[in-house]
Amino acid sequence: MKKPIPITKPTLESYDAYAPMFRKILKSGRLTLGPYGEEFEKKTAKYLGVKHCVAVSSCTAGLMLVMQGLELTGEVIVPSFTFLASAHAILWSGLTPVFADIDPKTFTVDPRSVEKLITKKTTAILAVHVFGVPANIDALTKIAKKHKLKLIFDAAHAFGAEYKGKKIGNFGDAEVFSLSPIKLLTAVEGGLVATNNDALAAMVRRGRNYGDDGTNNAPIAGLSARLSEFHAAVGLRSFAMFPANLKNRRVKAAYLINALKKLEPRLEFQFIPKDVTTTYYILSTRIDKALLGYSRDELHDFLKQAGILTRKYFYPPIHRQAPYKKYVRSGGVLPVTNEVTDSVLALPLFSHITKKELDAVIAGFRSFLKGRKPLTRAKK
Ligand SMILES: Cc1ncc(COP(=O)(O)O)c(C=O)c1O
Protein backbone atom coordinates (compact mmCIF):
# COMPACT_ATOMS: atom_id res chain seq x y z
CA MET A 1 0.00 0.00 0.00
CA LYS A 2 1.22 3.53 -0.81
CA LYS A 3 2.16 5.82 2.05
CA PRO A 4 -0.88 7.92 2.96
CA ILE A 5 -0.83 11.67 2.45
CA PRO A 6 -0.56 13.14 5.94
CA ILE A 7 -2.65 16.02 7.06
CA THR A 8 0.44 17.94 8.11
CA LYS A 9 4.21 17.68 8.49
CA PRO A 10 6.92 19.88 9.97
CA THR A 11 8.97 21.78 7.40
CA LEU A 12 12.61 21.33 8.38
CA GLU A 13 16.09 21.41 6.88
CA SER A 14 18.78 18.74 6.84
CA TYR A 15 20.86 18.19 9.97
CA ASP A 16 23.80 20.07 8.43
CA ALA A 17 21.82 23.30 8.50
CA TYR A 18 21.51 23.12 12.29
CA ALA A 19 24.85 21.49 13.16
CA PRO A 20 27.06 24.64 13.29
CA MET A 21 24.74 26.27 15.81
CA PHE A 22 24.41 23.07 17.88
CA ARG A 23 28.20 22.77 17.97
CA LYS A 24 28.56 26.37 19.07
CA ILE A 25 26.04 25.89 21.87
CA LEU A 26 27.81 22.77 23.13
CA LYS A 27 31.19 24.47 23.00
CA SER A 28 29.92 27.51 24.89
CA GLY A 29 28.25 25.50 27.65
CA ARG A 30 25.39 28.04 27.60
CA LEU A 31 22.45 25.71 27.04
CA THR A 32 19.50 27.89 27.94
CA LEU A 33 18.65 31.62 28.17
CA GLY A 34 21.60 32.49 25.94
CA PRO A 35 22.44 34.45 22.78
CA TYR A 36 20.36 32.37 20.34
CA GLY A 37 17.28 32.82 22.51
CA GLU A 38 17.90 36.57 22.65
CA GLU A 39 18.42 36.78 18.88
CA PHE A 40 15.24 34.80 18.29
CA GLU A 41 13.24 37.11 20.56
CA LYS A 42 14.65 40.25 18.90
CA LYS A 43 14.06 39.04 15.35
CA THR A 44 10.50 37.84 15.97
CA ALA A 45 9.58 41.05 17.86
CA LYS A 46 10.94 43.15 14.99
CA TYR A 47 9.00 41.11 12.43
CA LEU A 48 5.76 41.48 14.41
CA GLY A 49 6.40 45.16 15.17
CA VAL A 50 5.81 44.50 18.87
CA LYS A 51 7.89 45.75 21.82
CA HIS A 52 8.51 42.36 23.43
CA CYS A 53 8.66 38.74 22.41
CA VAL A 54 9.49 36.49 25.34
CA ALA A 55 10.46 32.95 24.36
CA VAL A 56 9.02 30.20 26.54
CA SER A 57 8.86 26.41 26.49
CA SER A 58 5.33 26.20 25.04
CA CYS A 59 2.28 28.26 24.20
CA THR A 60 0.46 26.60 27.11
CA ALA A 61 3.14 27.74 29.58
CA GLY A 62 3.13 31.19 27.95
CA LEU A 63 -0.63 31.52 28.47
CA MET A 64 -0.25 30.49 32.12
CA LEU A 65 2.54 33.00 32.67
CA VAL A 66 0.48 35.78 31.09
CA MET A 67 -2.48 34.90 33.32
CA GLN A 68 -0.22 35.03 36.35
CA GLY A 69 1.42 38.25 35.18
CA LEU A 70 -1.98 39.91 34.77
CA GLU A 71 -3.00 38.68 38.24
CA LEU A 72 -6.26 37.18 37.00
CA THR A 73 -8.84 35.82 39.39
CA GLY A 74 -12.26 34.21 38.89
CA GLU A 75 -13.67 33.48 35.45
CA VAL A 76 -12.11 33.60 32.01
CA ILE A 77 -14.32 33.51 28.94
CA VAL A 78 -12.92 31.26 26.21
CA PRO A 79 -14.39 29.56 23.15
CA SER A 80 -15.04 25.84 23.42
CA PHE A 81 -14.08 25.44 19.75
CA THR A 82 -10.33 25.50 20.30
CA PHE A 83 -7.51 23.14 21.20
CA LEU A 84 -7.56 21.77 24.73
CA ALA A 85 -4.53 23.77 25.79
CA SER A 86 -6.46 27.07 25.76
CA ALA A 87 -8.73 25.78 28.54
CA HIS A 88 -6.01 23.77 30.30
CA ALA A 89 -4.01 26.96 30.79
CA ILE A 90 -7.03 28.55 32.50
CA LEU A 91 -7.63 25.56 34.75
CA TRP A 92 -3.98 25.17 35.74
CA SER A 93 -3.96 28.86 36.66
CA GLY A 94 -6.66 28.19 39.23
CA LEU A 95 -9.24 30.05 37.14
CA THR A 96 -12.67 29.00 35.89
CA PRO A 97 -13.25 28.59 32.16
CA VAL A 98 -16.58 29.88 30.86
CA PHE A 99 -17.31 28.69 27.34
CA ALA A 100 -18.52 31.04 24.64
CA ASP A 101 -20.01 30.21 21.26
CA ILE A 102 -18.44 30.92 17.88
CA ASP A 103 -19.25 32.49 14.54
CA PRO A 104 -20.44 29.78 12.11
CA LYS A 105 -18.28 31.06 9.25
CA THR A 106 -14.97 32.19 10.76
CA PHE A 107 -15.11 29.64 13.64
CA THR A 108 -13.68 32.36 15.94
CA VAL A 109 -15.38 33.41 19.18
CA ASP A 110 -18.64 35.33 18.79
CA PRO A 111 -18.31 38.67 20.67
CA ARG A 112 -22.08 38.71 21.36
CA SER A 113 -21.82 35.35 23.10
CA VAL A 114 -18.82 36.64 25.09
CA GLU A 115 -20.66 39.73 26.30
CA LYS A 116 -23.65 37.66 27.45
CA LEU A 117 -21.40 35.53 29.68
CA ILE A 118 -19.79 38.40 31.61
CA THR A 119 -20.48 38.31 35.34
CA LYS A 120 -19.00 40.05 38.38
CA LYS A 121 -16.44 37.25 38.53
CA THR A 122 -15.19 37.66 34.96
CA THR A 123 -11.58 38.77 34.85
CA ALA A 124 -10.50 38.19 31.26
CA ILE A 125 -11.36 37.08 27.76
CA LEU A 126 -9.10 34.50 26.10
CA ALA A 127 -9.90 34.58 22.38
CA VAL A 128 -8.32 32.29 19.79
CA HIS A 129 -7.18 33.01 16.23
CA VAL A 130 -8.61 29.72 15.03
CA PHE A 131 -6.54 27.91 12.36
CA GLY A 132 -4.74 31.22 11.72
CA VAL A 133 -7.83 33.38 11.10
CA PRO A 134 -7.78 36.37 13.47
CA ALA A 135 -10.69 36.70 15.87
CA ASN A 136 -12.96 39.76 15.75
CA ILE A 137 -10.38 41.87 17.58
CA ASP A 138 -12.15 45.25 17.39
CA ALA A 139 -15.39 43.95 18.92
CA LEU A 140 -13.53 42.01 21.63
CA THR A 141 -11.33 45.02 22.47
CA LYS A 142 -14.44 47.17 22.85
CA ILE A 143 -16.09 44.64 25.18
CA ALA A 144 -12.92 44.22 27.25
CA LYS A 145 -12.59 48.00 27.66
CA LYS A 146 -16.27 48.48 28.49
CA HIS A 147 -16.22 45.81 31.22
CA LYS A 148 -12.61 46.46 32.36
CA LEU A 149 -11.45 42.97 31.47
CA LYS A 150 -8.04 41.76 30.39
CA LEU A 151 -7.85 40.53 26.81
CA ILE A 152 -5.49 37.71 25.84
CA PHE A 153 -5.21 36.03 22.48
CA ASP A 154 -4.23 32.41 22.02
CA ALA A 155 -2.31 32.99 18.81
CA ALA A 156 -0.91 29.44 18.64
CA HIS A 157 -1.90 29.19 14.95
CA ALA A 158 -1.40 32.75 13.88
CA PHE A 159 2.26 33.77 13.60
CA GLY A 160 2.29 35.81 10.38
CA ALA A 161 -1.46 36.55 10.26
CA GLU A 162 -2.65 40.14 10.04
CA TYR A 163 -5.65 42.09 11.28
CA LYS A 164 -6.43 45.33 9.44
CA GLY A 165 -2.87 45.60 8.19
CA LYS A 166 -1.23 44.98 11.57
CA LYS A 167 0.51 41.75 12.53
CA ILE A 168 -1.09 39.49 15.11
CA GLY A 169 1.04 39.88 18.23
CA ASN A 170 0.11 43.53 18.75
CA PHE A 171 -3.36 43.16 20.19
CA GLY A 172 -4.90 42.84 23.65
CA ASP A 173 -2.72 42.62 26.74
CA ALA A 174 -0.70 39.81 25.18
CA GLU A 175 -0.80 37.29 22.35
CA VAL A 176 0.82 33.88 22.71
CA PHE A 177 2.21 31.85 19.81
CA SER A 178 3.08 28.16 19.70
CA LEU A 179 6.33 26.91 18.18
CA SER A 180 5.46 23.21 18.34
CA PRO A 181 6.55 20.89 15.49
CA ILE A 182 3.84 21.48 12.91
CA LYS A 183 3.50 25.22 13.33
CA LEU A 184 4.64 27.42 10.43
CA LEU A 185 7.29 28.84 12.74
CA THR A 186 8.68 26.02 14.84
CA ALA A 187 11.41 25.63 17.44
CA VAL A 188 10.61 21.87 17.80
CA GLU A 189 8.69 22.90 20.90
CA GLY A 190 8.24 26.35 22.36
CA GLY A 191 6.13 29.45 22.58
CA LEU A 192 6.39 33.21 22.23
CA VAL A 193 4.62 35.76 24.40
CA ALA A 194 4.16 38.98 22.41
CA THR A 195 3.19 42.14 24.29
CA ASN A 196 3.65 45.89 24.26
CA ASN A 197 3.33 45.97 28.06
CA ASP A 198 6.80 46.37 29.64
CA ALA A 199 5.72 45.23 33.11
CA LEU A 200 3.97 42.14 31.78
CA ALA A 201 6.97 41.20 29.62
CA ALA A 202 9.21 41.48 32.70
CA MET A 203 6.80 39.29 34.73
CA VAL A 204 6.77 36.62 32.00
CA ARG A 205 10.58 36.73 31.76
CA ARG A 206 10.86 36.18 35.49
CA GLY A 207 8.01 33.69 35.53
CA ARG A 208 9.59 31.42 32.90
CA ASN A 209 12.61 31.03 35.20
CA TYR A 210 10.82 29.93 38.42
CA GLY A 211 9.91 33.54 39.19
CA ASP A 212 13.53 34.26 40.07
CA ASP A 213 14.63 37.78 39.21
CA GLY A 214 18.27 37.02 39.88
CA THR A 215 18.11 37.70 43.61
CA ASN A 216 17.32 34.11 44.67
CA ASN A 217 14.35 35.64 46.41
CA ALA A 218 11.46 35.06 44.03
CA PRO A 219 8.65 37.61 44.20
CA ILE A 220 6.29 35.17 42.41
CA ALA A 221 5.93 31.38 42.11
CA GLY A 222 6.93 30.93 38.50
CA LEU A 223 7.34 27.95 36.21
CA SER A 224 10.27 26.16 34.67
CA ALA A 225 9.42 27.27 31.15
CA ARG A 226 12.54 28.47 29.40
CA LEU A 227 13.33 27.92 25.72
CA SER A 228 16.66 26.10 25.42
CA GLU A 229 19.39 27.38 23.12
CA PHE A 230 18.95 24.30 20.89
CA HIS A 231 15.29 25.11 20.46
CA ALA A 232 16.06 28.76 19.81
CA ALA A 233 18.59 27.72 17.13
CA VAL A 234 15.96 25.63 15.34
CA GLY A 235 13.57 28.55 15.74
CA LEU A 236 16.05 30.90 14.07
CA ARG A 237 16.43 28.56 11.07
CA SER A 238 12.67 28.21 10.87
CA PHE A 239 12.27 31.99 11.08
CA ALA A 240 14.63 32.42 8.11
CA MET A 241 12.40 30.07 6.08
CA PHE A 242 9.18 31.55 7.41
CA PRO A 243 8.31 34.14 4.70
CA ALA A 244 8.73 31.52 1.95
CA ASN A 245 6.77 28.93 3.93
CA LEU A 246 3.89 31.31 4.59
CA LYS A 247 3.78 32.27 0.91
CA ASN A 248 3.83 28.60 -0.11
CA ARG A 249 0.95 27.77 2.19
CA ARG A 250 -1.14 30.55 0.78
CA VAL A 251 -0.46 29.52 -2.82
CA LYS A 252 -1.12 25.86 -2.08
CA ALA A 253 -4.27 26.54 -0.08
CA ALA A 254 -5.63 28.67 -2.93
CA TYR A 255 -4.86 25.87 -5.42
CA LEU A 256 -6.69 23.28 -3.31
CA ILE A 257 -9.64 25.54 -2.51
CA ASN A 258 -10.13 26.51 -6.17
CA ALA A 259 -9.93 22.92 -7.40
CA LEU A 260 -12.31 21.56 -4.75
CA LYS A 261 -14.77 24.39 -5.30
CA LYS A 262 -14.85 23.50 -8.98
CA LEU A 263 -15.78 19.95 -8.03
CA GLU A 264 -18.28 21.00 -5.37
CA PRO A 265 -19.27 24.69 -5.57
CA ARG A 266 -21.29 24.47 -2.37
CA LEU A 267 -18.29 23.47 -0.29
CA GLU A 268 -17.76 26.03 2.49
CA PHE A 269 -14.22 26.73 3.63
CA GLN A 270 -13.44 28.67 6.79
CA PHE A 271 -14.38 32.25 5.96
CA ILE A 272 -11.58 34.78 5.90
CA PRO A 273 -12.89 38.33 6.45
CA LYS A 274 -11.71 40.96 3.94
CA ASP A 275 -9.60 42.93 6.39
CA VAL A 276 -7.52 40.01 7.71
CA THR A 277 -4.98 37.50 6.43
CA THR A 278 -4.70 33.94 7.65
CA THR A 279 -1.70 31.65 7.93
CA TYR A 280 -3.54 28.55 6.69
CA TYR A 281 -2.09 26.68 9.64
CA ILE A 282 -5.11 24.44 9.09
CA LEU A 283 -7.19 24.40 5.92
CA SER A 284 -10.64 23.78 7.21
CA THR A 285 -13.94 23.11 5.49
CA ARG A 286 -17.48 22.39 6.63
CA ILE A 287 -19.24 19.31 5.34
CA ASP A 288 -22.85 20.08 6.10
CA LYS A 289 -25.00 17.04 5.36
CA ALA A 290 -28.20 19.08 5.05
CA LEU A 291 -26.55 21.11 2.29
CA LEU A 292 -24.36 18.56 0.55
CA GLY A 293 -26.20 15.27 1.09
CA TYR A 294 -23.21 13.50 2.62
CA SER A 295 -21.69 13.72 6.05
CA ARG A 296 -18.27 14.82 7.26
CA ASP A 297 -17.67 11.36 8.66
CA GLU A 298 -18.49 9.63 5.35
CA LEU A 299 -16.01 11.87 3.52
CA HIS A 300 -13.37 11.44 6.22
CA ASP A 301 -13.64 7.65 6.12
CA PHE A 302 -13.68 7.46 2.33
CA LEU A 303 -10.55 9.62 2.00
CA LYS A 304 -8.80 7.57 4.69
CA GLN A 305 -9.45 4.40 2.66
CA ALA A 306 -8.00 6.22 -0.35
CA GLY A 307 -4.80 7.05 1.59
CA ILE A 308 -5.65 10.71 2.26
CA LEU A 309 -5.66 11.69 5.90
CA THR A 310 -8.03 14.40 7.06
CA ARG A 311 -8.89 15.40 10.61
CA LYS A 312 -12.07 16.14 12.51
CA TYR A 313 -10.71 19.21 14.22
CA PHE A 314 -11.67 20.51 16.73
CA TYR A 315 -13.85 17.56 17.59
CA PRO A 316 -15.21 17.06 20.15
CA PRO A 317 -15.19 20.65 21.45
CA ILE A 318 -13.75 21.27 24.89
CA HIS A 319 -17.03 21.66 26.76
CA ARG A 320 -17.91 18.05 25.82
CA GLN A 321 -14.64 16.63 27.20
CA ALA A 322 -14.40 15.09 30.66
CA PRO A 323 -12.46 17.75 32.61
CA TYR A 324 -14.73 20.52 31.37
CA LYS A 325 -18.28 19.17 31.40
CA LYS A 326 -18.89 20.60 34.83
CA TYR A 327 -18.04 24.11 33.64
CA VAL A 328 -20.85 24.28 31.09
CA ARG A 329 -23.29 26.94 32.23
CA SER A 330 -26.94 25.93 32.44
CA GLY A 331 -28.47 27.01 29.18
CA GLY A 332 -25.01 27.35 27.68
CA VAL A 333 -25.54 24.76 24.99
CA LEU A 334 -23.30 26.47 22.43
CA PRO A 335 -25.42 25.64 19.39
CA VAL A 336 -23.01 26.96 16.76
CA THR A 337 -20.02 25.20 18.31
CA ASN A 338 -21.94 21.93 18.32
CA GLU A 339 -22.96 22.40 14.70
CA VAL A 340 -19.47 23.32 13.48
CA THR A 341 -17.65 20.60 15.41
CA ASP A 342 -19.88 17.94 13.85
CA SER A 343 -19.26 19.16 10.32
CA VAL A 344 -15.71 20.52 10.30
CA LEU A 345 -12.95 18.73 8.40
CA ALA A 346 -9.32 19.74 8.11
CA LEU A 347 -7.62 18.83 4.82
CA PRO A 348 -3.96 18.00 4.15
CA LEU A 349 -1.82 21.11 3.90
CA PHE A 350 1.74 21.86 4.89
CA SER A 351 4.33 24.31 3.60
CA HIS A 352 6.21 21.80 1.42
CA ILE A 353 3.25 19.69 0.26
CA THR A 354 3.80 18.86 -3.42
CA LYS A 355 1.48 19.50 -6.37
CA LYS A 356 1.32 15.74 -6.81
CA GLU A 357 0.06 15.34 -3.26
CA LEU A 358 -2.47 18.13 -3.68
CA ASP A 359 -3.67 16.58 -6.94
CA ALA A 360 -4.09 13.25 -5.14
CA VAL A 361 -6.31 14.97 -2.54
CA ILE A 362 -8.37 16.49 -5.35
CA ALA A 363 -8.62 13.12 -7.12
CA GLY A 364 -9.75 11.47 -3.86
CA PHE A 365 -12.45 14.06 -3.47
CA ARG A 366 -13.52 13.61 -7.08
CA SER A 367 -13.94 9.86 -6.70
CA PHE A 368 -15.91 10.37 -3.47
CA LEU A 369 -18.29 12.70 -5.28
CA LYS A 370 -18.63 10.32 -8.22
CA GLY A 371 -19.87 7.55 -5.98
CA ARG A 372 -22.37 9.91 -4.38
CA LYS A 373 -23.69 11.82 -7.34
CA PRO A 374 -27.40 11.37 -6.62
CA LEU A 375 -26.86 12.58 -3.05
CA THR A 376 -24.71 15.59 -3.85
CA ARG A 377 -27.56 17.28 -5.65
CA ALA A 378 -29.93 16.49 -2.81
CA LYS A 379 -31.86 18.77 -0.47
CA LYS A 380 -30.87 22.34 0.14
C1 LIG B 1 -5.18 26.84 19.86
C2 LIG B 1 -4.00 26.25 20.55
N1 LIG B 1 -3.62 26.75 21.73
C3 LIG B 1 -2.57 26.26 22.40
C4 LIG B 1 -1.82 25.21 21.89
C5 LIG B 1 -0.70 24.65 22.70
O1 LIG B 1 0.53 24.91 22.15
P1 LIG B 1 1.83 24.30 22.84
O2 LIG B 1 1.92 22.88 22.42
O3 LIG B 1 2.96 25.14 22.28
O4 LIG B 1 1.67 24.48 24.31
C6 LIG B 1 -2.15 24.67 20.66
C7 LIG B 1 -1.36 23.57 20.09
O5 LIG B 1 -1.33 23.35 18.91
C8 LIG B 1 -3.29 25.17 19.98
O6 LIG B 1 -3.69 24.62 18.83
Image (cartoon, rainbow, N blue to C red):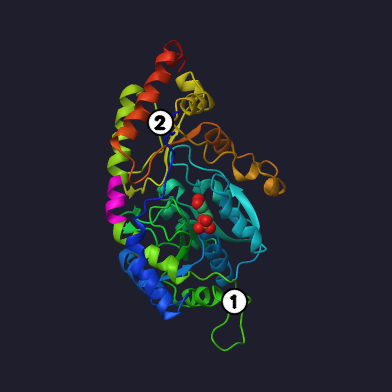
Q: Amino acid at mark 1?
A: Tyr
Q: Specify whether 253 is left or right of 338.
A: left
Quadrant in which the C terminus is drawn: top left
Crowd rating for badge 2 (residues with CA inside 10 Å; few <14, some 14–19, many 20+): some
What is the x, y in percent for residue 17?
A: 32, 61
Residue occupying the far bottom of the picture: 215
Q: Residue at x 36, y 23 (%)?
A: 264
* Secondary element at image label 2: strand
Q: Residue at x 41, y 67 (%)?
A: 232
What is the x, y in percent for residue 117?
A: 61, 51
Quadrant in which the N terminus is drawn: top left
Answer above or below: position of 277 versus 310: below
Which stretch appears magenta? 242-248
Q: Is the residue at mark 1 in contact range of ligand 1, meaning its CB lies under 8 Å from it?
A: no
What is the x, y in percent for residue 309?
A: 46, 34
Q: Residue at x 31, y 69 (%)?
A: 46
Mark 1 or mark 2, which has the lower sequence index? 1
Residue 210's mark?
A: 1
The secondary structure making up most of the magenta span is: helix
Mark 2 lies on residue: 268
Evaluate if marks 1 and 2 touch, with contact meaning CB atoms under 8 Å apart: no
